[in-house]
Image: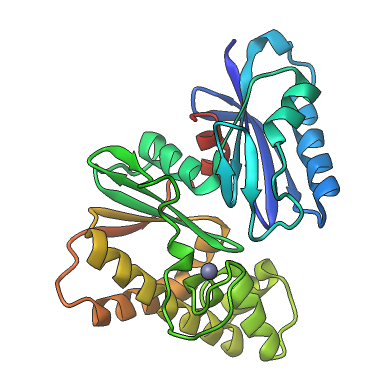
Amino acid sequence: MKYKIGVDVGGTKISVGLVEKGKVIRKVSFGTAKGKEKVLGQIVEGISLVLEGIDKKQIKGIGMGLPGIINKKKGRIIRLPNLRGFENFNIVRFLSKKFRLPVKIENDSTCAVIAEHNFGFCADNMVLLTLGTGIGGGVIINGELYSGGGNAPEPGHLIIENGGRECNCGSKGCLEEYFSGRAIIKEARKEGLRMDIIQLQKEAEKGNKKARRIYEEAGKNLGIGLSNIIKLLDPELIILSGGLSNAHNLFLHSAQNEMRKRTFFRFKGQIKIAKTLKDGGVIGATLI
Ligand SMILES: [Zn+2]
């Protein structure tokens, strides 16, 4: 049994990989469909595709990272804020019946931080942010994964504005309503730029002033979030991962400026783009 299957379920993209000792041997990705049945169909199709021609006896099991709140022990999804319809669904039971393999689930950002800690940048005290459709995160303190009572961290829902924009989580003024793929697309629409996040990034990189300003302004909001994280944990490393991190040239400068302005002590740690940015979610899902 030398392989594991890693599944990374995101609000924008679903990736499935065949992984051997932290290396992705085969991978398929889909743009996330709308609706529970279609998403489940994509997951099943992805697993079937990477399994093609492989003896099942070579597969240790399936690990899956999910963007939301889950009950790991029971194998159940509690809520995925950016993927409706999965409330209380037992995805472990569903997949283990379908593939007759052991299945484990974990929060997607936890998978990303485990992958980075093992195969990317590593420090005893580090915070990883997954910047995607929404924002998630993982924290390592003294070399150990930290989740408090089981739900920490949720950096996307740090409040950066009292009484601010309504968030999917039920609160108002959360960071991910001001800095995330979803928030940036919304801002772009207001400016008459109706396009998806990949197109918007290209537009900004080509020099479109409106698009560039949207990323810059959003970056300031990320900076407020970073400052809050630093004041709470002062980590050695802050790692930016998730698809939106590919656009770091467009927002990191303004984020760091804002972060410095709002942090009264000198942050001696480093902010880096994840080494495992491309496949961290898939690799991490096989390490749970
Ligand atoms: Zn929220």
Closer to us: 284 or 69: 69
Residue 66 visible, this angle: yes
Closer to us: 176 or 255: 176
Q: Position of residue 163 (x, y in %)?
A: 48, 86
Location of residue 24 with respect to 102 vertically, above or below: below
Q: In the shown orientation, is residue 219 left or right of residue 272?
A: right
| Image quadrant assignment for residue 45 | top right
Residue 50 visible, this angle: no
Which residue is rendered at x = 14% and y = 73% of the image?
265
Q: Residue furthest left?
A: 265
Location of residue 49 with respect to 179 vertically, above or below: above
Q: Position of residue 166 (x, y in %)?
A: 59, 79
Location of residue 62 with respect to 163 vertically, above or below: above
How many tags in the picture?
0
Q: In the shown orientation, is residue 174 left or right of residue 237?
A: right
Q: Position of residue 174 (x, y in %)?
A: 49, 74
